Amino acid sequence: MNGIRDGATEDFSFGPFHLSVARRLLAKDGNPVDLGARALDLLVALAREPNVIVSKKDLISRVWPDVIVDEGSLRFHMTGLRKALGDGQDGARYITTVAGRGYCFVAPISQPNRSPEDVAGSDFRHAILPTRLDRMVGRDQDVVRLSEKVMASRMVNIVGVGGVGKTTVATAVAHHLAPTFNGAVLFADYGMLSDPALVAAGIASMLGLPVGSNDVRPSLIAYLRDKQIMLVLDTCEHLIEAIADLAAAIIEAAPKVYLLATSREALRIEAETVYRLDTLTCPPDDPELSAEALRSFPALQLFIERAAASGASLALDEQDTRIAASICRKLDGMALALELTARRVESYGLAQTAKLLDQHLTLGWAGSRTAPPRQKTLQATLDWSYGLLAEVERTVLRRLAVFVGDFTLDAALEVVSSSDIAPAAIFDAIDNLVAKSLLATHPVGSMMRYRLLDTTRAYAQQSQMDEDRIGLNARHAAYYNRWLEQFGPDWPTMSAGSDRLPYFVSINNVRAALEWAFGEKGDLAVGISLAAAAVSVFQMMSLFPECKRWSERALLAMDEASKGSVEEMHLQAGLGISQMYLQGGRETSQIALGRALHIAEERGGAVDQLRILGPLHMFSLRVGDFNAAVDYARRCSLLAVSVGDAATIELGHFFLGNSLHFTGDLVNARAELEAALRSEPRQRRTPASYVGFEGKHLAGGILARNLWLQGYPEQAEIQARRAISDAAKLDHSLTLCIALLGGIAVFLWRDDVPSAEEHIDWLVSRAGLHFLSPYVTVARGFEGEIAIRRGEVALGIDTLRRCIEKLHTSTYEVFTTMLQLSLVKGLALAGEHDEGIARINATIELVERDGDRCYLPELLRVKAGLLSVAGYVEDTEACLMSSLKIGRRMGACSWELRAATDLATLWSENGQQQNAWSLLNTVYERFDEGLDTADLLKARVLLQSSRRAN
């Protein structure tokens, strides 16, 4: 007979459920629950061992003792049991799965019929347990995990920074496990105790034992020896050695006693299991996340709850939610800091509270009157921790406050070191600060990173001496200057955003060093050198506003003796490039880049010249001087060959292919672009790394356009999507925006409006995030074209007019011809033929003068349409013949097909069906893909019509 069913007389109660083993009945609020026999057996097996992990093998042997079954049967019946219990619904938790080990019953459970001799700690006189919070935010998983660990190992220490919520979580765990110990749970708060000799006496007195001798440990241990009790030892860090010694003795002598401690450092005893309690998860600084998504993060939930409880009225609209999220990030998700700050919202309002935090972390804001003295303010909490440090640890902590965000051990050793502290002492101090939860650690890649929470950093900064601060800032700036020079050019060789994470986290320290160097007590010479090293990294990270800001500031600070230096070259290039991407083709960009090129040519370095010629090529495209762009590209290509580096040659291929594409040399453009894409991934730095990007990452979007023009619509779409996907994986916004621009053009040419719209939204979001305003304007222009295609002609025309004018104002002309074509088509639909003719003629004149001849066949075709409406038949035919001829000469089969379709239509209307069919069929037969695209479908319908007419 099944062992689960034999002689079982006990009853269990948990939540709304009552389980009678003898009657084999599970009831919910007095009503029977329909539960299968195997599922009931599983419940009994787990309920008999609450908070104990029961292995799958053990469960199978108990529920199926005489039958061989596999784990699939166990999972099936476990799923049915959880469904019957409503496990996971409305926050209810009964059974948890422990990966690789088994299952555990985690709900509080009581046994009304338990015999007195089985009661744990039956002579336990009285327990002291703080009240559990009605609702604890973001810690449910911690409570479950800690409960499992306590029952599995008997000694768990919750370790974390002051104010993180260790006591709150420990209290919740104690309440959660209290039924398991039949209420025999004792909570000992050592926060008010300062004498190590009283550690054992404190527990003994709470247990009601006489404390009449100097050492009560023997009698305490003797009392606990046969008791099943849970002891919670709260706030142990200042009495760490005495508590560690007592805990070790209890664990060894009293096998039924379970210990849960809270401390800012580990006890370091053999039986201890350390549980690191992290701060609450904060919403990321991501403008693409909705307000609803931001409010799902525990830190923000706690802040909102505590602010509301203090009487604050929060709108919780988009703006308020983002302000509150920024406060949570500023406070690193530290529970105490969030609660103290939330109390200020009722007095100051949300925006002013955030402003006060930005100006200075308010360490003195008061909290609850009932809180322990060490937790009434952040200042008191940190004073408590600071007071427990050795002098060398205090010094190192103060000096580490110079770092913003993450830093490495190498950085700490170099910046913190001075004549009064040896490196070995710094190593020891950092280890101890980590152990005492004042310094956080986490790995980034293969290297460990360290970080002070902002609250701890603000506290440490208050303690810094002025003379020490100056030396610290100078060493800090010098270190990050060398770091930029050594590692900055590695960025383009990294294939994934995860590879670049160390650069993103370190750039905060570069910013801080720049602010100090150009500040009132800074060092301008250090600032100029640091800015010169930083601007290219800002450029690689698409941080163009910062690139522009520090370039301008450093150039203004330069004296005459520094003119013509390598620093000026880098700064002028940074200024020119950032202005170009932020504002389009301003004259100031050209002046700055021209000056940088002059210095590079005087210095004679090919790589330095490439660093400037590449952006000058891009600048020429942006201002619409496509002929100049070709000249710069050819110079780049020749220099790249002279350098003899594969990556640099690849870059030359991209520059040349890019400019040849726009000038209409499609065959050679394709050869150059495909050569750029053929290069192999590189894991090492090359001379091309110093240019700021790699040709292969930019060539894909341009090649997609080129393929469509040459008559390969399917290959063009595949290439466009591949280029966008590859750029997204790089996590480099400028590269992604360029790929999106090329892809959207292809989608529009293919008449794939849904794909175009999807990628336009992406372009607006990413370009707006990095202040790349010309790209946003082009995207809005594309939206205007889509509006026209969908029949909203007036809206589309108005949008395109505004966008084109805005691009003209910022002299960003690389896409204005394409947008002019869209506008003229809209004007034709609206019957505004005079403006359409004027615009098309002006655009054709500019194209023939400036060189973006890749659009010329289409411009002539669209002009023919306008002339046809006006009744100029001969001029219409002449324009279409020119379009056809130029398209054929360029190898632009897609433009040629459109022109041939319009000309064939014209001839058919004039009774020349045979000529029309012959002309169009000749062009149509050159296509062997994309036969379902709009242009080819239109041509096929016309061919079929002409054939029937013949």
Image (cartoon, grey):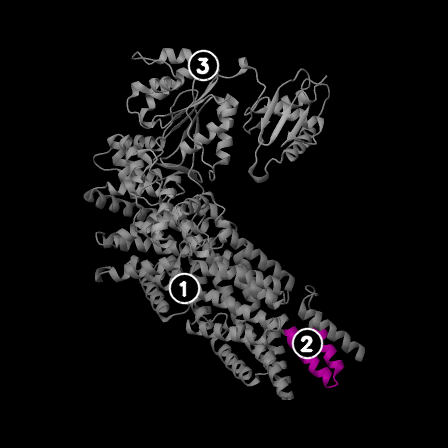
Q: Residue at x 40, y 21 (%)?
A: 269
Where is residue 292? Give x, y as percent. Answer: 51, 51
> To which residue does mark 1 refer?
582
Q: Which mark is residue 254?
A: 3
Residue at (60% x, 61% y) in the render:
755
What is the quadrant of the C terminus in the image?
A: bottom right
Structural crowding at the residue carrying mark 3, measured as other residues with C-alpha within 10 Å and reported as few (<14), some (14–19) or many (≥20): some
Q: Which residues are magenta?
A: 896-922
For label 2, the residue is: 901
Label 3 vs label 2: CA separation? 94 Å
Does label 3 or label 1 sit earlier along the sequence? 3
Q: Nearer the viewer, residue 184 or 773?
A: 184
In front: label 3 or label 1: 3
Q: Amino acid at mark 3?
A: Ala
Q: Is residue 345 depicted above or below 608 in this figure? A: above
- Where is residue 623, by image quadrant? bottom left
Q: Answer whether residue 915 is magenta in the image.
A: yes
Majority secondary structure in the magenta region: helix
Task: Point out residue 574 in the picture as x, y percentages from the top left corner.
Answer: 36, 60
Q: Mark 2 or mark 1: which comes first in sequence?
A: 1
